[in-house]
Image (tube, rainbow, N blue to C red):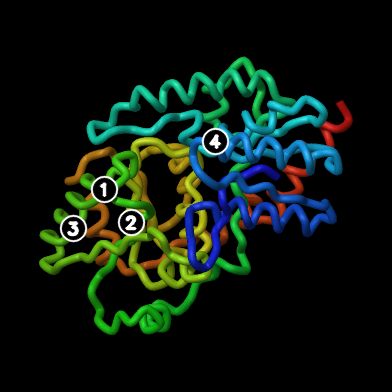
């Protein structure tokens, strides 16, 4: 596995889903050696290439997560390469106006070329697969660890976080400083909901939270609000579903598909009035979702997804 730095207690990061996928593949009896690309920006890729050359002789196959890890992996020619594109590496990232930035458009074109040079491609959504046509991609979202992400009693979860009031709280998944996450729209929608309810609704940021704490936040909040401009298949949404947390979202990535048939959740236009009104309605009902049941029915748990990834490995090695 070639990947960006994985989370540690001192560096929570956003790659917990990759770390869990690695563990789930190991649980199938597949031996996995992990190469994390880290260090100084100017030289870390050269250092990673040297380390990859040293270690890949023992491998049957290299699986790279994210486009730039794929390019490092493809620079060696001895072993087959599988690349998992994550989202922004094929869809780009938006600026404050919602337009895809010029630099990320360049990255997308480079990664589309990479897809033609590797032995198999995994993407998180059908939208991402469409970007790569005519290359055929395997659509495999990240699996959810249903042991780690379980519904907790809301009052108990709030006590663990030191929230000893009954204030309504809405979880925002991401760093509000990143324009692509659409925080201003979420802020405006929450203001609309607060006005409708006659009380302040607090926004809780799900950013730089240790992975083991995330399920506590998902259980302690009343809803999640997703306002991103681009997403592949956001892990935060499937993890919220596993904890039965209601989700209000704009139609981004595969979120409409994920939330189809999920109770106490909704996909709304990118309009603060509509989002805020739906959020207020949901907060008034105080119901939880049936997201966990949906995850199980659709086979989006870690074990099922690991088997699908392993099937890609077998196909590549047979070819």
- Viewer-nearest of discs 1 and 3: 1
Q: Residue at x 65, y 40 (%)?
A: 48
Taking the spot 30% from the left edge, 80% from the top edge, the residue there is 163
**Tags 4 and 2 touching, CB below 8 Å:** no
Spatial CA distance of label 3 from label 2 is 15 Å
Sequence-wise, the earlier of marks 3 and 4 is 4
Mark 4 sits on what residue?
125
| Callout 4 secondary element | loop
Q: Disc 2 designates what residue? A: 172
Query: N-terminal of the two: label 4 or label 1?
Result: 4
Name the residue located 45 percent from the left edge and 79 percent from the top edge: 153
Looking at the image, is mark 4 or mark 2 earlier in the sequence? Answer: 4
**How far from the left and from the top, in percent, is residue 10?**
49, 66
Image marks 2 and 1: residues in contact by CB distance under 8 Å:
yes
Please name the residue that numbered disc 1 is placed on: 183
CB atoms of marks 3 and 4 within 8 Å: no
Q: Of callouts 2 and 1, which one flags the residue occurring earlier in the amino acid sequence?
A: 2
Q: SS for tag 1?
A: helix
Q: Give the mark, 1 or 3, whose residue is nearer the N terminus.
A: 1
Q: State which mark lies toward you, 3 or 4.
A: 4
Please state which of the two labelled residues, at mark 4 or mark 2, is closer to the viewer.
2
In the rendered view, tell whether residue 220 sits above or below residue 144. below
Determine crowd level at label 2: few under 14, some 14-19, many 20+ residues with C-alpha closer than 10 A.
many
Few, some or many C-alpha atoms within 10 Å of disc 4 (few <14, some 14-19, many ≥20)?
many
Q: Residue 229: horizontal and vertical position, in percent?
A: 34, 36
Q: Cα distance, mark 4 to mark 1?
A: 23 Å
In front here: 136 or 94?
Answer: 94
């Amino acid at each position: 596995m070639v990947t960006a730095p994985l989370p540690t207690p001192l560096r929570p990061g956003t790659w917990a889903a990759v770390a869990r996928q690695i563990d789930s593949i190991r649980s199938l009896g597949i031996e996995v050696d992990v190469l994390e690309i880290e260090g100084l920006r100017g030289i870390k890729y050269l250092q990673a290439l040297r380390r990859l050359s040293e270690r890949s002789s023992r491998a049957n196959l290299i699986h790279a997560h994210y486009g730039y890890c794929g390019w490092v992996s493809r620079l060696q020619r001895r072993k087959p390469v599988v690349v998992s594109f994550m989202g922004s590496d094929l869809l780009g990232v938006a600026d404050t106006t919602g337009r895809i930035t010029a630099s990320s458009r360049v990255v997308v074109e480079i990664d589309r070329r990479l897809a033609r040079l590797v032995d198999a491609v995994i993407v998180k959504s059908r939208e991402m697969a469409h970007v790569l046509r005519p290359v055929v991609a395997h659509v495999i979202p990240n699996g959810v660890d249903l042991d780690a992400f379980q519904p907790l009693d809301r009052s108990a979860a709030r006590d663990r976080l030191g929230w000893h009031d009954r204030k309504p709280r809405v979880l925002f998944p991401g760093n509000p400083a990143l324009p692509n996450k659409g925080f201003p729209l979420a802020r405006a929608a929450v203001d609309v909901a607060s006005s409708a309810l006659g009380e302040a609704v607090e926004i809780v940021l799900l950013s730089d939270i240790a992975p083991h704490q995330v399920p506590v936040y998902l259980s302690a909040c009343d809803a999640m609000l997703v306002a991103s401009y681009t997403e592949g298949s956001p892990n935060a949404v499937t993890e919220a579903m596993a904890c039965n947390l209601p989700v209000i979202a704009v139609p981004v990535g595969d979120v409409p598909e994920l939330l189809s048939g999920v109770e106490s959740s909704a996909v709304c236009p990118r309009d603060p009035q509509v989002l805020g009104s739906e959020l207020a309605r949901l907060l008034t009902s105080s119901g939880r979702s049936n997201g966990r049941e949906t995850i199980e029915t659709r086979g989006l748990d870690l074990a099922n997804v690991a088997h699908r990834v392993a099937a890609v490995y077998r196909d590549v090695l047979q070819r």
